[in-house]
């Protein structure tokens, strides 16, 4: 069964809200073996919705429509689909009773247009709305299935989980499992990674391999399909092994993790504490680190040392270093890392100094970055970066490289 998800609502096209419903439904449909090949968004316009439905019917077995089931005049999804399919609308008494009870329970007066929300397509299977008013519905017409769901995620998601999945699986002749796994890589570009596994991508069928790059990272989404869940997972395991045999040095985690998450877990597991001296990153490393629940117990503190006065006066970078080497230097990065660890009695000191942009500094080009890492009182190791890009991108990538280098050093012991 191949599905298309149509989101109805002019507010989606205007960018006022994000279409999270399509992402949620795609993930849930994959778990029950239903392919989603198209996402469509259309405004509150009957004519354009009619056009979208005709296109969807030409290429999909299951059409899921979210939104447009409310009480106002621009909520025309049911009426448009009823007209398109040549079926009527009838009052669902259970839904109507639920709506009336809601208004009584909240001591509100129900307006007449709220009765519209209890209308359902004639002959459809009604999906109760336990978190709102408008019910959903599933209708088979010819060879096509149509599912209508409310737009608010707080109503749509529980309705689909409780009633929608069961309604669809009962109509499937086979229930293939579709399982996905995301492999995350850092320190290798998308082009180079693809080159290393080009033959695997070219020969992919099941599992499929989909590369994606974002802000200095590369991910590979592996997707396998099988009627037996365990067999689908075995297919993923086999493909993952082939990939990691080639580019495993750049792999750092799975699915929704991040470099900062992996660093926070590593510090928690080892009991090590960290302190930071941030110049060009301006506190970004600490802000991201402390956004992770529980990670704050590993952080002793940090200093945003944008000026030379702070570098010298608080973090005790030698005047000789600033005058002869400059603040954008390996020597300055090393002293910052060692001194912030000593100042805060932390096991680890990490420092960031460099040129984020837009202008050069000390004759150094934009993107020149030094990251200092001092472990357990030892002299700092310094990594130099030559980044390209704008100011924001350089700062984000610097933080990620800091996590990457620190994880690497910790794993090396």
Image: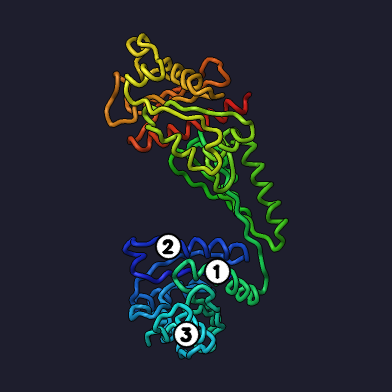
In terms of image quadrants, where is residue 320?
A: top left
Which residue has dot 2 on it? Answer: 19
Asked if residue 234 is positioned above or below residue 88 in the image, the reply reads above
For this view, does 172 lie left or right of residue 158?
right
Mark 1 highlights which residue? 158
Tag 2 and tag 1, C-beta contact below 8 Å: no
Give the number of the mark in front: 2 or 1.
Answer: 1
Query: As rendered, which of 126 and 51 lies closer to the eye?
Result: 126
| Distance in Å between CA atoms under marks 2 and 1 | 17 Å
| Residue projecting furthest to the front | 107
SS assignment at label 2: loop
Of marks 2 and 3, the one in the foreground: 3
- The answer to whether residue 1 is visible is yes
* Residue at 64%, 35% in the rendered image: 269
At which x and y percent is residue 115? 42, 86
Picture coordinates of residue 126 (x, y %)? 55, 82
Q: Where is 47 relative to 387, above or below?
A: below
Quadrant for residue 277, please give it.
top left
Q: Earlier in the sequence, mark 2 or mark 3?
A: 2
Q: Which residue is drawn at 42% across and 67% down?
A: 40
Please tell me which of labels 2 and 1 falls first in the chain. 2
Q: What element carries label 3?
A: helix
Where disc 1 sits, the SS reads helix
Q: How crowded is mark 3: few (under 14 residues within 10 Å), some or many (20 or more)?
A: some
Residue 160 in the image: state x and y as whole percent: 55, 70
Q: Is residue 13 above or below residue 218?
A: below
Residue 388 higher or lower than 220, as above or below:
above
- Residue position marked by numbered label 3 in the rendering: 100
Instruction: Identify which residue is drawn at 50% across, 22% down.
Output: 341
Residue 204 visible within the image: no
* In front of the other: 133 or 31: 133
What's the distance in space between the residues labelled 3 and 1, CA to CA? 21 Å
């Amino acid at each position: 069964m191949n599905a298309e998800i149509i989101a109805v609502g002019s507010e989606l096209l205007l960018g006022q809200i994000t279409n999270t419903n399509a992402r949620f439904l795609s993930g849930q449909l994959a778990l029950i073996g239903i392919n989603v090949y198209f996402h469509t968004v259309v405004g509150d316009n009957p004519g354009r919705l009619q056009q979208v439905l005709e296109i969807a019917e030409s290429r999909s077995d299951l059409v899921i429509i979210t939104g447009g089931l409310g009480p106002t005049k621009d909520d025309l999804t049911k009426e448009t689909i009823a007209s398109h399919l040549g079926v009527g609308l009838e009052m669902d008494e259970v839904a109507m009773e639920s709506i009336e009870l809601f208004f009584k329970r909240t001591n509100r007066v129900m307006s007449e247009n709220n009765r519209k929300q209890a209308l359902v397509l004639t002959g459809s299977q009604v999906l109760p709305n336990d978190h709102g008013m408008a019910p959903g519905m599933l209708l088979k017409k010819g060879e096509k299935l149509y599912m209508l769901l409310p737009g608010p995620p707080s109503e749509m998601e529980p309705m689909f989980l409780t009633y929608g999945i069961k309604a669809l699986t009962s109509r499937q002749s086979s229930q293939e499992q579709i399982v996905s796994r995301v492999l995350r890589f850092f320190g290798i570009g998308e082009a180079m990674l693809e080159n290393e596994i080009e033959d695997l991508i070219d020969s992919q069928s099941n599992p499929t391999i989909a590369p994606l790059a974002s802000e200095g990272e590369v991910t590979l989404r592996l997707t396998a399909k099988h009627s037996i869940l365990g067999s689908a997972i075995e297919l993923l395991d086999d493909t993952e092994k082939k990939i990691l045999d080639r580019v495993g040095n750049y792999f750092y985690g799975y699915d929704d993790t991040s470099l900062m998450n992996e660093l926070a877990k590593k510090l928690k597991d080892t009991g090590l504490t960290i302190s930071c001296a941030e110049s060009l990153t301006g506190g970004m490393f600490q802000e991201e680190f402390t956004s992770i629940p529980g990670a704050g117990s590993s952080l002793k503190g940090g200093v945003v040392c944008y000026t030379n006065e702070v570098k010298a006066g608080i973090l005790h970078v030698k005047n000789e270093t600033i005058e002869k080497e400059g603040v954008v230097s390996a020597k300055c990065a090393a002293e910052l890392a060692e001194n912030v660890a000593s100042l805060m009695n932390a096991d680890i000191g990490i420092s960031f100094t460099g040129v984020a942009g837009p202008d050069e500094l000390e004759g150094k080009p934009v993107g020149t970055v030094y990251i200092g890492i001092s472990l357990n009182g030892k002299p700092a190791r310094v990594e130099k970066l030559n980044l390209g890009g704008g100011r924001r991108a350089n700062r984000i990538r610097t933080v990620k490289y800091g996590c990457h280098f620190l994880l690497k050093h910790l794993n090396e012991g």
